[in-house]
Image (spheres, rainbow, N blue to C red):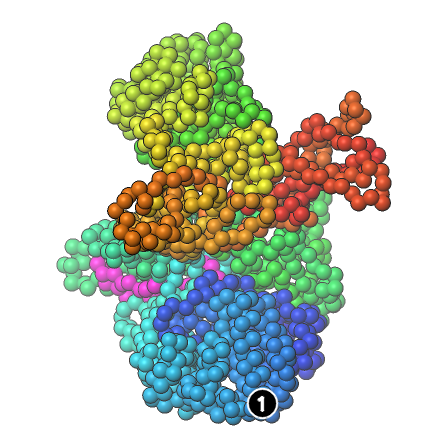
């Protein structure tokens, strides 16, 4: 036996006997069992060189069993650890494999060793298909008796070995154990045996939810080794303390029914054994295995198929592939399909069975020799086996000989097909619910002339309405009327190496539908001379041959992001590098080396399921190239499913100067890619990217800021101290926000970009040329075509670099007629450059100068200004009726201006702005509201908060709500408006002075404003004075409420489609006694059925019947520094429904004396049963996410915190004043995507006495929305020894890193 390049191979020469296996020595990684109790106890396995290679890399997605009988398959193939022991793969193209995973629920890897550890290849592919994997613990024969006595000597020893087995399963990534105690034992050992089983089950469940411990029917509760062949009083005590029983396979008819009765409501945990070899098994096994399966199906218990490798071991005819498919077709016929996929996206399959004669990557063969590696299995197709297939029809097989596009297999369709007929073959039986985003299908095909293959999709709605779609690349007219829709996919351009392969791609958007079937459809194009064929009497039958290489399904947003090469640390530890001289050659060398790689931040990255390993042997050009260039080609070595690979016996020719290894990670499309473009950089002033750049098909509202000339309180990037600073918070009514001033180039302060982007609103800067100075600017700008292009590119650079979305261009000056063409060049080039650099960006022309170069406002869209409109994204106009007609299908790009100050504007603006809005709504064009800061600048009574809410309520009444949120998770809001009198963190006030910072705005609630609110009802307001739980604001509910009544206030109007995972909702409340507030959620199904779910902590009996469901949340324990605050948490699972509304519900608990009043006959007195009472409650924040876990923050050691700028001065009292800029970044160089950082300083003082216990004070300095913060005028008291600047990392879900674990910078002040 010899190994080469990480693969096992065999030779016909008789090799010398191998040395004894030493798992501590480097060698080709293998899987192996633990054979002695001593080895198990000593944990020596974890010291093995092979251990890290044996970890499975594919987690099980869904651990819950459906409510039905289950199918367990027990491997037992040639004693185990055959071709599958080679972790990195072997060289046997005919190696044993299983590929009918959709017919099973549990897979057990079995051998007759003490501890059988499943090779990771089985765990990886089983998990991929949703199948659980168990190892085996077995004691048998005389040696087993000795082991059992030691194992069960004490309760403590039983617990110890149970925990060691748990550790192995959890660490290696499989799902539990089959326990087989096939020895007779002293009855006195039985209590400890029960302890062993019970403790193993408990520790597995606590460490790995969904794990299994299954007992094999062998030793009885009396200590006798007597197989019962049924569940009864002799083995049920073991069954009762674990997850199931594998009943011995020599049962009789009637035993399954008896066992089901004994199990009661756990009948599906009874797995009745069937030996495929037929050793005394019911029905005889082998080709009659289905006889036993039919009985088990009838008696409604689970099945345990033992040794399906019988097909392989006994070389059933005509060949393994055919015999295996035929045998499993009997299982499917008896029990049906048990696993459906795809269920989630992205989904990818290349139909690889984990063995073959070649391997390809994107159509290029990288390996042309036999191989096997079950870890490489793709999702397996649900191909139907027909034992009576018509030889003249289409035969469908997974083919290993035909060149593949990806991996080592594909599906071939071969046979004959008549004209005007088609053939459908099932590929996948799916359960894929479609959400809001379009779903993209990409698939590779290769075919002979006139052989075509498409994809046929079966879909079902919630109401069971069925639809079918066909993707067909050409000749699809023949299917008109046969399918619900026929879509012609586009051909994707491919590399020239993919000879003959065509990549097709198309998308569908069918929100709320479920894909239930994915099929291949074979057809031929209609013949051009059909009439001649009919006249000649030909039956139109012809040879057919086509291949599908792979298929990818993903949403439009699921493109793989690959970490840059520089982000990885690739190592070859010196202790694992071994050079030897090649036999038969004195010049070449042979290399053994272990490669490992990890991201430099120290984290493993489980999102990459596979790594392809190549080597490039570099040699200096033999022709004597003076540049010293190197020559070499990439050689494929294999693939890894963990972040390590062992290269064995690599021959290195003489003259090779260096070796370059490559391990590109493969995403769900399984293709090597160039490094992705640099991710969005939150160190730029704008730290919140816009999530969705597309406009809906409706009129839009643009809001143009123009408040006191701009750059007032909002100019302070890190925030100011004016609690009454101007702000906008009705973002749900806006589509575009323009920051305007009368400067030449107005750059939006990042606070506006951050909060607008958070709410889905685009932000534009302004370029304005006006008055005499503007004429000089314009002349220079449009002096030449080149100057116009140059200034356009400078503006685009500013927008892209600072993170806003485009420009409002306002040329309020005349230009010479000859320069108009250059002005058009400026507008056009700016638009094109913005679009290419930032998809979804906008350039809007302000209606001013005409195409003739004359400054004359047209007040409408016409031939004088339409040339500018035609080359950009819209026009800011002044008149409506004719403009819509001239714009045609671009009428929504016409933004009709309304000046809120009322300067000559239609309707008068101010409190009558809605008059103009109503007209624009009627004519179906967009609106541009100019200077809504009028409310603030003119001090409208009674106060800014109230007046602002009243004014924007007129906008909402006229146009309705433009934006819905939340739409995606995680979602967090603390209702902060970006200004206030204090700031809190988890209920503790960290700042007690006035402040403003619009970047700190949370998602703003959709509170309804009524100017006629009854003083006796509940008033709802965003409150800055009341102490908050998080940030500087909250929502208060204040007023009166009668017993038995409730009050509902709208918080958010959402459009949040729920998927397979439950959502977790957490919210903080504080209230006076008998004032309660809960959350009322409105749901809509795909069929528009409406449900209301109330989340309320107590006193909810009255709501029974009023809402679809009432859920009582659990109270989360909080710190003592958050007095009065209660944090509630719950989860909801409503797969396929959409949350359309999130409301607060105010209520009072039912009076304890209400029953007594009714009994006393006074219930008719409404003053007694419905007494109005004062109501006061506060809602401070709300979190919605798909996981109950908090965010993972990089440890403090992952960050590099620096102070590149320091300045010390002294004040008049002799203490020091510090100005310092601190900056931070992750050490691996990647950019973090955290939206916010809280900055603290800790001062340590000993006052010059080292013996004294230091006094440490902590102070909140502010928050940063980029990875830098400037601290000015920090007063350092005398006696301060050191300063510690803490950077608290905050996540998008509202959680923050613990201060003790946050990045920090420490300054020693001894010499200052």
Is 796 contained in the magenta span? no
* Residue found at x 67% / y 63%: 594
Is 420 contained in the magenta span? yes
Part of the protein shown in magenta:
401-429
Which residue has dot 1 on it? 188
**Is residue 157 rendered to the left or right of residue 494?**
right
**Is residue 1052 rendered to the left or right of residue 408?**
left
Write down the quadrant of residue 409 in the picture: bottom left
* Residue found at x 45% / y 84%: 236
Residue 949 visible in the displayed image: yes
Residue 641 in percent (x, y) is at 56, 62
Q: SS at mark 1?
A: helix
* Residue found at x 47% / y 33%: 1023
* Residue found at x 65% / y 53%: 602
Residue 178 in percent (x, y) is at 51, 78
Q: Residue furthest top?
A: 772
Residue 796 in percent (x, y) is at 51, 27
Using a 10 Å C-alpha cutoff, classify the residue at mark 1 as few (fewer than 14 neighbours), some (14 to 19) or many (20 or more): few
735 vs 1154: above or below: above
Q: Quadrant of the N terminus?
A: bottom right
């Amino acid at each position: 036996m010899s190994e080469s390049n990480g693969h096992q191979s065999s030779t016909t020469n008789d090799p010398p006997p191998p040395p004894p296996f030493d798992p501590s020595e480097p060698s080709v990684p293998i899987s192996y069992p633990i054979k002695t109790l001593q080895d198990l106890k000593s944990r020596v396995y974890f010291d093995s060189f092979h251990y890290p290679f044996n970890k499975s890399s594919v987690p099980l997605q869904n651990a819950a069993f459906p409510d039905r009988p289950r199918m367990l398959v027990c491997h037992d193939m040639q004693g185990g650890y055959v071709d599958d022991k080679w972790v990195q793969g072997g060289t046997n193209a005919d190696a044993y494999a299983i590929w009918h995973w959709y017919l099973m629920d549990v897979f057990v890897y079995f051998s007759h060793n003490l501890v059988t550890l499943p090779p990771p290849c089985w765990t990886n592919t089983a998990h991929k298909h949703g199948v659980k994997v168990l190892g085996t613990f077995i004691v048998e024969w005389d040696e087993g008796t000795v082991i059992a006595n030691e194992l069960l000597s004490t309760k403590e020893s039983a617990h110890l070995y149970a925990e060691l087995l748990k550790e192995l399963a959890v660490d290696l990534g499989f799902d539990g154990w089959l326990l087989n105690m096939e020895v007779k034992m002293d009855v006195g050992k039985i209590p400890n045996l029960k302890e062993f089983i019970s403790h193993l089950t408990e520790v597995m469940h606590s460490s790995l939810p969904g794990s299994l411990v299954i007992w094999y029917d062998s030793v009885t509760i009396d200590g006798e080794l007597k197989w019962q062949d049924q569940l009864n009083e002799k083995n049920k005590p073991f069954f009762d303390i674990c997850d199931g029983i594998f009943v011995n396979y020599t049962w009789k008819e009637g035993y399954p029914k008896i066992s089901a009765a004994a199990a009661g409501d756990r009948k599906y945990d009874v797995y009745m054994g069937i030996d495929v070899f037929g050793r005394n098994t019911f029905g005889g096994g082998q080709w009659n295995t289905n006889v036993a399966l039919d009985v088990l199906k009838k008696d409604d218990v689970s099945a345990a198929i033992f040794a399906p490798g019988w097909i392989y071991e006994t070389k059933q005819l005509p060949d393994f592939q055919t015999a295996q498919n035929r045998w499993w077709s009997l299982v499917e016929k008896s029990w049906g399909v048990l696993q459906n996929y795809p269920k989630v996206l992205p989904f990818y399959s290349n139909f690889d069975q984990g063995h073959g004669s070649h391997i390809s990557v994107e159509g290029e063969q990288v390996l042309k020799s036999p191989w096997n590696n079950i870890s490489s299995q793709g999702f397996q197709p649900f191909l139907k086996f027909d034992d009576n297939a018509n030889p003249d029809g289409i035969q469908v097989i997974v083919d290993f000989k035909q060149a593949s596009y990806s991996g080592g297999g594909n599906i071939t369709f071969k046979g004959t097909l008549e004209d005007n007929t088609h053939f459908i073959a099932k590929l996948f039986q799916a359960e894929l619910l479609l959400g809001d985003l379009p779903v993209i299908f990409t698939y590779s095909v290769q075919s002979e002339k006139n052989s075509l293959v498409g994809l046929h999709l079966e879909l079902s709605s919630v109401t069971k309405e069925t639809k079918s779609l066909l993707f067909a690349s050409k000749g699809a007219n023949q299917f008109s009327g046969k399918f619900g829709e026929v879509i012609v996919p586009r051909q994707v351009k491919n590399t020239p190496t993919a000879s003959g392969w065509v990549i097709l791609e198309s998308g569908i958007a069918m929100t709320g539908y479920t894909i239930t079937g994915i099929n291949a459809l074979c057809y031929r194009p209609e013949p051009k001379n059909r009439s001649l064929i009919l006249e000649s009497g030909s039956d139109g039958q012809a040879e057919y041959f086509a291949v599908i290489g792979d298929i990818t399904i993903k949403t439009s947003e699921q493109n793989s992001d690959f970490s840059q090469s520089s982000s990885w640390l690739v190592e070859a530890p010196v202790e694992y590098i071994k050079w030897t001289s090649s036999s038969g050659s004195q010049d070449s060398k042979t290399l053994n080396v272990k490669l490992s790689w990890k991201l430099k931040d120290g984290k493993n990255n489980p999102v990459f399921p596979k790594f392809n390993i190549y080597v490039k042997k570099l040699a200096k050009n033999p022709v004597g190239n003076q540049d010293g260039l190197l020559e070499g080609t990439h050689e494929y070595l294999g693939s890894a499913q963990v972040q390590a690979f062992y290269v064995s016996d690599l021959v290195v020719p003489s003259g090779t100067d260096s070796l370059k290894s490559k391990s590109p990670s493969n995403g769900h499309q399984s293709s090597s890619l160039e490094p992705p473009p640099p991710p969005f950089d939150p160190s730029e002033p704008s730290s919140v990217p816009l999530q969705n750049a597309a406009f809906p098909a409706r009129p839009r509202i643009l809001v143009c800021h123009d408040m006191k000339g701009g750059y007032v309180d909002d100019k302070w990037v890190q925030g100011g101290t004016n609690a009454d600073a101007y702000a906008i918070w009705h973002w749900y009514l806006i589509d575009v926000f323009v920051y305007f001033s009368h400067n030449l180039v107005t750059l939006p302060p990042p606070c506006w970009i951050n909060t607008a982007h958070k709410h889905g609103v685009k932000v534009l800067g302004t370029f304005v040329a006006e008055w005499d100075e503007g004429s000089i600017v314009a002349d220079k700008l449009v002096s030449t075509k080149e100057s116009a292009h140059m200034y356009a590119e400078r503006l685009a650079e500013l927008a892209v670099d600072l993170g806003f979305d485009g420009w409002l261009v306002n040329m309020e000056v005349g230009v010479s007629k000859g320069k108009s063409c250059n002005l058009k060049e400026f507008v056009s080039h700016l638009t094109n450059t913005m679009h290419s650099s930032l998809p979804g960006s906008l350039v809007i022309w302000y209606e001013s100068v005409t195409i003739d170069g004359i400054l004359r406002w047209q007040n409408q869209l016409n031939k004088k200004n339409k040339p500018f409109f035609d080359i950009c994204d819209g026009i800011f106009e002044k008149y409506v009726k004719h403009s819509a007609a001239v714009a045609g299908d671009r009428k929504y790009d016409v933004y009709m201006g309304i000046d809120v100050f009322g300067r000559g504007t239609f309707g008068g603006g101010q409190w009558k702005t809605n008059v103009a809005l109503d007209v624009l709504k009627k004519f179906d064009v967009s609106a541009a509201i100019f200077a809504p800061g009028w409310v603030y600048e003119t001090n409208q009574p009674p106060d800014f908060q109230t007046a602002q809410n009243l004014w924007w309520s007129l906008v909402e009444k006229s146009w309705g709500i433009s934006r819905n949120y939340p739409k995606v998770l995680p979602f967090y809001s603390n209702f902060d408006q970006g200004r206030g009198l204090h700031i809190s963190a988890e209920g503790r006030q960290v700042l007690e002075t006035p402040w403003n910072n619009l970047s700190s705005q949370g998602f703003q609630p959709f509170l309804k404003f009524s100017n006629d609110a009854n003083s006796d009802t509940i008033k709802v307001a965003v409150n800055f004075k009341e102490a908050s739980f998080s940030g500087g604001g909250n929502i208060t509910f204040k007023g009166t409420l009668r017993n038995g009544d409730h009050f509902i206030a709208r918080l958010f109007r959402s459009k949040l489609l729920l998927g397979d995972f439950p959502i977790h909702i957490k919210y903080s409340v504080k209230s006076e006694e008998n004032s309660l507030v809960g959350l009322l959620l409105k749901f809509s199904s795909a069929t528009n059925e409406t449900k209301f779910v109330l989340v309320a902590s107590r006193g909810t009996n009255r709501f029974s019947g009023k809402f679809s469901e009432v859920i009582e949340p659990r109270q989360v324990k909080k710190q003592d520094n958050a007095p009065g605050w209660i944090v509630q948490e719950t989860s909801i699972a409503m797969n396929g429904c959409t949350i359309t509304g999130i409301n607060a519900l105010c209520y009072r608990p039912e009076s304890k004396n209400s029953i007594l009043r009714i009994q006393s006959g006074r219930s008719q007195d409404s003053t007694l049963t419905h007494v109005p009472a004062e109501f006061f409650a506060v809602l401070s924040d709300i979190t919605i996410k798909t996981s109950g876990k908090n965010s993972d923050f990089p440890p403090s050691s992952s960050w590099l915190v620096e102070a590149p700028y320091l300045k010390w001065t002294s004040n008049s009292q002799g203490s020091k004043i510090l100005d310092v800029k601190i900056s931070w970044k992750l050490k691996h160089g990647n950019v973090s995507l955290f939206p916010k950082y809280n900055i603290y300083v800790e001062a340590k003082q000993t006052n010059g006495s080292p013996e004294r216990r230091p006094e440490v004070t902590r102070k909140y300095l502010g928050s940063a929305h980029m990875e830098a913060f400037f601290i000015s005028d920090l007063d350092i008291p005398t006696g301060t020894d050191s300063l510690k600047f803490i950077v608290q990392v905050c996540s998008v879900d509202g959680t923050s890193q613990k201060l003790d674990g946050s990045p920090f910078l420490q300054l020693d002040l001894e010499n200052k």
